[in-house]
Amino acid sequence: MADPSLRKITDRLSKTLTQDKTVQETTNDLREILDVDRVILYYFYLQWRGQVTFESLSSPQLSVFGMTGADDCFNGEYAALYEAGRVRAIPDIELEPIHPCHRDFLRSIQVRANLAVPVLNFKGLWGLLIAHHCRDTRVWLPADIEVMKKAAENLAHASSIRDS
C-alpha cells in the first residue's frame, strides 16, 4: 500500500500538471487562431504586481516568461477598469493615447498591437490574458475580442485560478 502523504503529493502534482496543460493549450490555441506572435497569461501575485506565468510564442526570441512587467504603470485605476470587464484593444501602440510608461514597456518587449482581457475569479481581478502582435499594427476584430474573452472566462473556471 502506498504512503498516504506520497499519494497526496502525487495527486496534487497530477492536478497541477493537468491544469498547466489546459492553460498552455489555451494560450497555444489562441496564438494560432488569432495569428499573433505571443499570447501570455499575466498573474497578479500581489495587489497590481504581476508576472507572466504562461506564454505561447511564434518564435523563442519573443519570450517574456517570468517577466514582471511595468508594474509602476498598472495601478488601482486600471485595475478597477479591468475588474469591471474592460477589454483593451490597441491596434498601434505608437498612435494610441496611452501612458508613456506603458508605451515604453510595450516597445521594450517588441509589441506593436495589443489585446488584453481580464481573467476574473470570485475575488476579482486574478490576471490578464494578452495577445501581442509584434510584426506590425493590427486592427482587432470583434471576433478576436470574443475569442479572447471566452478563453479568459474558461481559464477563470480552472480550479487553480478560480480558487486562488
Image: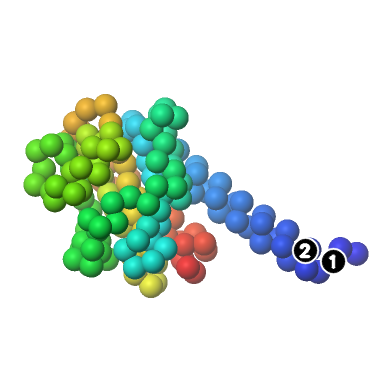
Residue 128: image location, x then y, percent: 34, 54
Q: Residue 89 appears at what percent x and percent y?
A: 20, 45
Q: Are marks 1 and 2 in contact (CB under 8 Å)?
A: yes
Q: Secondary structure at mark 2?
A: helix
Residue at image x 32%, y 46%?
A: 130
As shown in the figure, which amino acid type bears the numbered disc 1?
Asp
- The residue at the point 23 percent across, 63 percent down is 75
Q: Residue 152's spot in the image, x, y percent?
A: 37, 54
Tell me how far mark 1 sits from mark 2, CA to CA: 6 Å
Q: For the image shown, how many numbered marks are present on the structure?
A: 2
Q: Amino acid at mark 2?
A: Arg
Residue 4's image quarter?
Answer: bottom right
Indicate whether 107 appears above or below 12: above
SS assignment at label 1? loop
Q: Nearer the viewer, residue 96 or 64?
A: 64
Residue in the picture at 19% in, 31% down = 137
- The label number, if any, that marks residue 3 in the structure image: 1
Residue 69: mark: none
Q: Which residue is mark 2?
A: 7
**Residue 102 seen in this snapshot:** yes
* Other-residue count near label 2 (Cα within 10 Å), few / some / many at <14 / 14–19 / ≥20: few
